[in-house]
Amino acid sequence: MPPEWIAEPVEHDGQKRITLRFSKRPDWDTLVRTLVGSRWSSRLRAWHIADTRANRDWCGINSIAQHYTPKSSDDYPKHATDKIESFVRWMRSKRYSENTIKTYCDALKTFLKYYTAKDIEDITNKDVIDYNNDYIRKHNYSASFQNQTVNAIKLFFKTVLNSKMETETIHRPKSGKQLPNVLSKEEVKKILEACANLKHRAMLTLIYSCGLRRSELLNLTFEHIDANRKLLIIKSAKGNKDRITPLSEKVLALLRDYYKAYKPQKYLFEGMYGGQYDERSLASVLKRAVTMANIKKPVTLHWLRHSYATHLLEAGTDLRYIQELLGHSHSKTTEIYTHVSTKSIKNIKSPFDDLDNY
């Protein structure tokens, strides 16, 4: 393993895995994709591989200083488990999405394992600052990961009686301006054409053509398709909001062909043995298509959503409509796409071109 990488054992989706974190470099992106069983987790914001003796040896895992080795809920006191379970019930009563609940609980469990020697009521604001510096920043975790952790801590400690935590004075990290990753239309076409499997092509096409999030695609049922009005109805999306997005005639034709071939029972896209299609399998579908299309970029499913929004903007679609189509609560979230659209930038003439006789 390159010495600059950071490896850490975790439990992810009930499996023992090793996360691999490193600075963004094309050669490292290529290397991690060649590892047997490597997967990208958007929730962990990291690549991960199976926690085996061989992989531990390759990672030099025993030589890495770690604060804990995540195993199970037994790593922290039972009263912490009880409080987290109460927190989960409270979030469900407030109609938080299951994705948010899982993300917050994962972040909380990691935080509480770090302070396993302290009673929850005795954890203070200083402990949060120390955790941010000595764990999150030391391991090079992203500002968005830190922000999720802070959100989870603030919300959780509001429900803890007799806590010494002053949640209102816990500050979130200053986030950098990260531009969305966008593919060209030609690259999107190559990826979709690389899908020989009809189901796989239908899934990726629907994500791009409607700007869907991964969970939104996997939760679709037949009731969400209004073929007469050529609309896709997205129910209980992020923020528990519903929205509609147009369905092109070409996409409808593709979905009809898919239905005739597969005849799913409940969900629009189902696994081999029925039931909701697995999100990791969906990520693997894209990974294979990108490889087959010979695109040397670390493309994720969300890149297709970003590309949808950017291509709409470049085609002249009003930003307010794009905000509605994406389901953004705030216009500032949608405005980020104006920074990656190249339609106007390409027309800017460099002053270098005005230098005579150079």
Image (cartoon, rainbow, N blue to C red):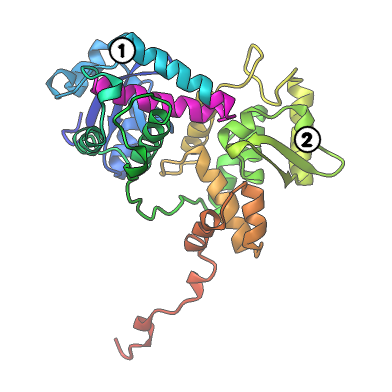
> Would you place residue 148 above or below residue 58 in this image?
below
- First to last magenta residue range: 91-115
Tell me the element at label 2: strand
The x and y percentages for residue 148 are: 40, 37
Residue 353, position as x, y percentages in the image: 38, 83
Q: Position of residue 299 (x, y in %)?
A: 46, 41
Circle 2 packing at 10 Å, graded few (<14), some (14-19), many (20+), is some
- Nearer mark to the viewer, of 2 and 1: 1
Contact (Cβ within 8 Å) of mark 2 with mark 1: no
Q: Which residue is mark 1?
A: 71
Q: Farthest residue toward the bottom?
A: 356
Q: Give percent across and percent down for residue 339.
A: 47, 62
Q: Which residue appears at 56% of the width and 21% of the height?
A: 278
Q: Amino acid at mark 1?
A: Lys
Residue in the image at 55% along x and 50% along y: 307
Amino acid at the residue labelled 2: Ile
Q: Residues within 10 Å of mark 1 (few under 14, many from 20)?
A: some
Q: Quadrant of residue 272?
A: top right
Q: Quadrant of the N terminus?
A: top left
Q: Main secondary structure of the magenta part?
A: helix
Quadrant of the image occupied by residue 21: top left
Mark linked to residue 225: 2
In this picture, residue 200 sits left or right of residue 356: right
Residue furthest left in the image: 63
User: Residue 102: within the magenta?
Assistant: yes
Whichever of callouts 2 and 1 sits on the residue coming sooner in the sequence is 1
Left or right, residue 277 beside residue 29: right
Q: Which mark is residue 249?
A: none
- Numbered circles on residues, count: 2
Q: Is residue 261 left or right of residue 17?
A: right
